[in-house]
Image (tube, coloured by chain):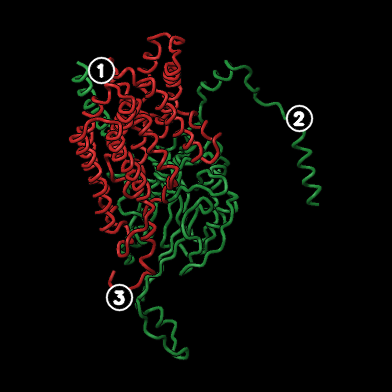
Chain colours: A green, B red
Amino acid sequence: MANSQTVREIEVAALAPAAGPERPRGLLELVRQGLARVEGPEMQTAVGLFTDVSLCIGCKACEVACKEWNLVPSNAPEWRAGYDNTGSLSATSWRHVKFVEDFAASLPPPPPVADLDVLALLAEPKQGQWHIMSDSCKHCVEAPCNLACPTGAMIHTEFSTVIVQPDVCTGCGSCTSACPFGVVAQSPIDGHAHKCVLCYDRLRDDLHPACAKACPTQSIRFGPVDELRAVARERVTALHARGFGAARLWGAERTESYSEVNAFYLLLDEPEIYGLPSHPVNPWVHVRGDYLRGAVGFLAALLTLAVFAWRLGS
Amino acid sequence: MSGSRTRQAGGYRDQVGAHPSPWEGAVPALDVFLHDLGLGVFVAATVAALVAPAVMAPLLRVAWPLSATIVALDMLLLLVDLGDWTRFFHMFRVFKPTTPMSLGVWALSGFLGVMAVPAAWGVLSLLGRSSLLPGSFPWTVAALALLLAMPATLYKGAVFSVTSQPGWRDARWTAGYFAASSVLFGVAVLGTISGFARTPAAHLMWRAVSPLVLLDTALLAAWSTGLSREMTRRMPRREIAWFWMTQLGSRAAAVLVTLLAPPSATAFGVVALLILFPGYSLRSAFLRLPHLPRLAGLATEP
């Protein structure tokens, strides 16, 4: 059955191509078409993800859904301390569920089973907590990866998300070096950069990203970014009222050194324990000054040389 | 949180920050070095020849082909580093002047294309057939190449400083230092050639070495202020001290040689070695910096 299916596919592919846009003829036409400005798709409402770590149960459904929908290759199993066997975001892991055990260093021994009282257990003060977070690309409004890409492979879509076009990616590594969150990575398989594309194909079909669709607790919520921000603020207020004083939003607001991001987080502790910087810095804030200092160094050296050449020449 | 609590080695603190840059190893280090060397030879020779044509013009027939060859070799390394050379053409899909890599590829490719004419003139001159090209033509083209040489020189340092890599992101004078030291490289190489050829250009280059080394050292000091924090986190103190001692010591030795010895071919050779070897070693160490593991006790982002 599999063989006949394969043969059928080959037969279909071998058929004459359907009428499509004509290929450019001649060098002039090729140049003209190359320079012609192509209209992009109409801009849509900016969408994104709001990840609420207080609701994450660490089921990894988002990781699996992401790999399945986007056909991301599987990783070799890797045993680590705790439940995290993904390790980090990579070209083959566009989602990474992180587990942080925040418990007392030495817990009192549990009482004998016969003495267990469920109601008493629920009432006793908590010994600690899990921090579980599903991490992915932040889809920055001013994305360093996009700014660094020399080929236009990294683009902002009509949904204000950031995607890679692997067919025009050179694998130069600029985006990998620029991303301050360790999201973009080069694939050892094809050498191109890869990262979460927020299921661009699904968005175009008016569907939710696979991770948000698969999340059983709505820890990952998808929607228009403005609405998500409002929801997130309400949630923080609610958590504060319930005693989670450390609850905070990360990435929802622009800071002095970084733009707001379209995939932002509600955290229950300081960002560093989740692998996020407290004060992210966009390296592009310095680009003009760096060019200027480069010009200063270059011209100073040339001027020095020219003075000696002039003195000797004259 | 209180000290009595455990957090599985601090959670993901060790993952705060960027993925290590793929620009690591001998090829990128050699690429940066050859880039600065090739452009430095052209810029130093052409600018000096514009100001003092009688002294410098004879050196151009060697300098221009040499510069074009070194830059071509550098571009070959860039292609090798990409893994698949055909991907290089994607670089010409867009022109983003604010993106150093895009600016650099356009400027460097344009420079190399334009440099074919002065380089060909140089080779023809060496073969005694310079009359095949009209007299002013190579000069006109070289002036155009000079315009392209500036962005081509500046981009390389900026490529590193606009990353999120520890050390690279903090060093604000990378482009300034690389650009100035490329001129010094050029002077060192041209001086050695003129020393061997016994042309008057040797005197010019000899005198220019000391002030250029001083400028280079001043810019190195400015550059190192940005690097020092990450160096102390990733390199043992002894290694850092040794590194800076060799860098500064070689510069001091180069200045001393130019002050005490006449501009002979041997003296120029020594000075060139004292400038070029530390230049390569500095670039190599700079590229390695973000890939070095943090020293014990400094495993997390501040």
Percent across and percent down for residue B203 are 24, 25
**Callouts 1 and 3 in the same chain:** yes
Q: Which residue is mark 2?
A: A16
Is residue B252 placed above or below A126 in the rendered structure? Answer: above
Please name whichever residue, A81 or B249, is drawn nearer the observer in this view of the structure. Answer: B249
Q: Which residue is mark 1?
A: B51
Report if residue A223 is visible in the image: yes
Please name whichever residue, A277 or A240, is drawn nearer the observer in this view of the structure. Answer: A277
Mark 1 or 3: the one toward you: 1
Percent across and percent down for residue A106 are 35, 80
Is residue A107 placed above or below A6 in the rendered structure? Answer: below
Mark 2 Cα-neighbour bin, 10 Å: few <14, some 14–19, many ≥20: few
> Are the residues at dot 1 and dot 2 in contact (C-beta closer than 8 Å)?
no
Q: Which residue sits at x=20%, y=20%?
A: A312
Percent across and percent down for residue B63 are 37, 24
Mark 1 or 2: the one toward you: 1
Is residue B257 placed above or below B149 in the rendered structure? Answer: below
Mark 3 Cα-neighbour bin, 10 Å: few <14, some 14–19, many ≥20: few
Q: Which residue sits at x=26%, y=39%?
A: B173
User: Marks 1 and 3, Cα distance to the nearest angstrom?
Assistant: 72 Å
**Callouts 1 and 2 in the same chain:** no
Quick one: SS at disc 1? Answer: helix
In this picture, residue A207 sits left or right of residue B175: right
Q: Which residue sits at x=39%, y=27%?
A: B67
The chain holding disc 3 is B
Quick one: SS at disc 2? Answer: loop
> Are the residues at dot 1 and dot 3 in contact (C-beta closer than 8 Å)?
no
Q: Which residue is mark 3?
A: B4
Amino acid type, callout 3: Ser
Quarter holding the C terminus of chain A?
A: top left
